[in-house]
Amino acid sequence: MQEAKSNPTWFGHPAGLSTLFFTELWERFSYYGMRALLVLFMVDTVNAGGMGLDDKTASAIYGLYTAFVYLGALPGGWIADRLLGAQRAVWIGGLVIAAGHFTLAIPSTSAFFVGLVLVVVGTGLLKPNVSAIVGQLYPEGGARRDAGFTIFYMGINMGAFLGPLICSYLGEKVNWHAGFGAAGVGMLLGVIQYKRSAGRLGDAGLHSAAPPSEAGGVDRAWYPVIGGCVIVLAAVVMGLTGILEFNALVLAQNTTYVIEGLAFAFFVYIFSLGKLTPMERKHTLVIVALFITSAVFWSGFEQAGSSLNLFADRHTDRMVFGFEIPAGWFQSLNPFYIVVLAPIFAAVWVKLARRQLDPSMPGKFALGLLILGLGFLVMVVAAKIVVAGNQAAPYWLILTYLLHTMGELCLSPVGLSSVTKLAPKRFVGQMMGIWFLATSLGNLLAGLMAGRFNPEALNEMPGLFMQIVLTVTGAGLLLLVFTKPIKRLIGKIE
């Protein structure tokens, strides 16, 4: 009994897991709740409380926002490792996210953009570090650690499921800013819960990995952080005051080129100056292939918050027993499917492995892309119904999100694991950063692709969805063709 009291548990796991479970649940509640509203709010008319933007601009802003959320994880992880420690980074990040959502709740264009910047900064601090603390709760590693991450993953999807249901109802039925405010309340609940129960975390993520600076001195690592904050603040101020004029579409396109250039330069550096062994060179080539296919996958998958969200709003018959379902409710389908299907997929992979039939790493990636393409093929049929002058039934989107989730379960869980296995040991951290860069690039491309859907030219919609089908399935088929050569490059690592 003495040991139980000194080491309290939560369902057989460290008690600190409950703190992180509910922190991440509320953070994902706020993120996906606001995400379900974002494009719909931007394209709604000013008279109805929206911003009155055209689809192309709104989708570009959406792409930039989601891309920078993932990019923010890179400096956010570095700040925690070098300066704050993960626990403090999560606390500060949660407060900044809540401030961002409450700022979005203010009916002002200036407040809208300031709110987005705050959510990006806060998520960059919180998201990578809350996961890092989960890992540190299990210094022994092993199956118990995997089970802990599975429970934590359920918290992520519970929040992602509930957020759109509540925030979309308030935003679409009451007032857009009420929906944004609800996201802020959710994050505030998460922050309060985190602070009240932070003692359960013990020393996990409490301190930074860097040695403390000299007494009375300022760690020089703060200088780039302060410089970065000054640059962001200056850009926001100049943008809001009109000194600088930002064109969202041009900015999104240029940011795409920058990310592609960074990835290209990184891989050139690794191959030319990284002193790779022949086996490391082969493994890095595989990471290059996975980087490209991952970006293609997310460019299609992330249509959920833009083109598919607009399809639900404008072209889907959402009346059920006299009640019009909020368009954002369809955003809850993906996390619902994940909770239901993830255990099934895990069991299938294990069963196939016992029979020596488990698909290889590139095989699972290819399968994910092909299933994603099948989902967009469903949307081609739905778009043709709209072009014929009818509203599409809800089951078209329900089936599309089911297929997209199946594709995600084939590709996403394999991605991070693959990079950690394949990356040269001395470059693991940098390779993980590059992996997030692929997701960021995919989000940007998704926003640009969604902007091509013109509400004034509905006849083009089936062709545009078909272009996505051809892009993602083409990448999947190409990966299938090169599966055997890629497996030879991987060697016995699987």
Image (cartoon, helix red, strand yellow):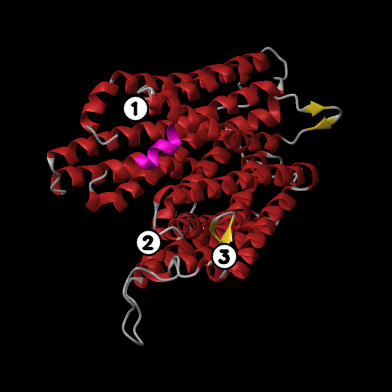
> Residue 416 magenta-drawn?
yes
Nearest to N terminus: mark 3 or mark 1: 3
Q: Which amino acid does label 1 sit on?
A: Ser
What residue is shown with label 2?
Answer: 78
Q: Residue 360 carries which label?
A: 1
Q: Is the magenta stretch mostly helix, strand or loop?
A: helix
Nearest to N terminus: mark 2 or mark 1: 2
Q: Give the extent of the magenta segment.
A: 411-417
How far apart, in angstroms, are the residues tagged by discs 2 and 1?
A: 33 Å
Q: Which amino acid does label 2 sit on?
A: Trp
Q: Which residue is drawn at 51% across and 63% down?
A: 90
Nearest to N terminus: mark 3 or mark 2: 3
Residue 270 spot, x, y in % from top left: 20, 46
How far apart, in angstroms, are the residues tagged by discs 3 and 2?
A: 31 Å
Residue 97 spot, x, y in % from top left: 58, 59
Figure check: 269 above or below 87: above
